[in-house]
Amino acid sequence: VVYRSSTTAPVNIAVVKYWGKRDPKLNLPTNSSLSVTLSQDDLRTLTTASASEAYTEDVLLLNGAPSDLTGARTQACLRELRTRRAALEDKNPSLPKLAHLKLLLVSENNFPTAAGLASSAAGFAAFVRAIADLYELPASPTELSLIARQGSGSACRSLFGGYVAWRAGDKADGLDSQAVEVAPASHWPQMRALILVVSAAKKGVSSTSGMQQTVATSGLFQQRIATVVPANMDLMEQSIADRDFAKFAEVTMRDSNSFHATCADTYPPIFYMNDVSRAAIRAVETINQAAGKTVAAYTFDAGPNAVIYYLEENSEAVLGTFYPLLQSVDGWKQSTNFKSTVQLDETISSTLKGGVSRVIMTGVGEGPQKTDVY
Ligand code: DP6
């Protein structure tokens, strides 16, 4: 017999960034963070976990290719899930004995890996959720977030849809370092995201190593975790509760700027944004000026891609500005033929034209979904 379970998990993009570990082994962060879960129609990982007596070793197939399962983080997740299943089998002797069986994990993304989007969050969230479902663990998303966190910090936020906080916690064992839902997607379903995929010349510093260098060398970072992030978390949660886009946008942009400033303050400095990223920032500023209010917010992770949050009602101002420049790249949805009156500076236009290789039009979405498709 083969026991099987499949699930999807979403990508999330932080508006208050996680950057820094207080315990690299348990993946405990130096600060809380907050993200928006993006729609799985556009971005998701689908993972099927199977267990069988016939399997002789644990195997992971990622987009069709055999992939490493021996890393310490993956092993930590597997160990914890198996321990929980074993405890369940001890309590209920009638359950099939799955904890000792080898696993086959088949995982696929619905977006091109070449897009350079960090998929580790969706990947680890789907990994943990698929095995937890296979094992029928009676665990809430918050409990599973403690396990996914050990795979990749940002993965703990992908166990929920909508607006999600990862509370840093202060316990040494990390049992209070977990994700919680701040608001479901239905609370503020008008939130949209336009991702400008920017091809980087070479792969930059990984977030795992970048944040360790920042913690070790940046003075600015101390201020970020002591005062900047705590204030941003409060403002962000308030702006979401009030559906106050102007406040949401300002905190999003300020927090991204603060995070990239600590990267520049790292010694030697780390640069994730490039000229195309900076052109996207200028474009967002021009759009907001022309609108006479804040209708768009940029944010950047550990790479040059721009994520631009905006509300559905302002689609014309935002999409209409980028579409004429970028209409030849992949990813526009059919409904897009907006025109805007916003006039971008010539240098900004040509930098965006030359540097954006694809767009992804998406918006806030739901958390992991159990599925029959395998
Ligand atoms: C800039 O979650 O990829 O995207 O815990 O080492 O796997 P590890 O790091 P990871 O870092 C994400 C950093 C970020 C900000 C964020 O998502 O909050």
Image (spheres, grey):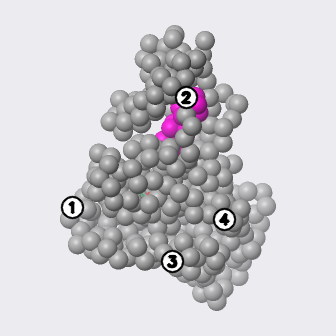
Q: Are marks 3 and 2 in contact (CB under 8 Å)?
A: no
Q: Quadrant of residue 317?
A: bottom right
Quadrant of the image for the C terminus? Answer: top right
Label 3 to label 4: alpha-carbon separation? 20 Å
Q: Is residue 166 magenta?
A: no
The percent position of residue 80, horizontal first and vertical second, equals 41, 34
Residue bearing the label numbered 1: 216
Residue identified by numbered label 3: 235
The residue at label 1 has a CB less than 8 Å from ligand 1 = no
Q: Furthest-front residue in view?
A: 91
The earlier-in-sequence mark between 1 and 4 is: 4
Residue type, numbered disc 3? Leu
Is residue 363 visible to the viewer in this orientation of the structure? Answer: no
Q: Main secondary structure of the magenta part?
A: helix
Q: Does the rendering let one see residue 374?
A: yes
**Earlier sequence position, callout 1 versus callout 3:** 1
| Disc number lying in front (1 or 4) | 1
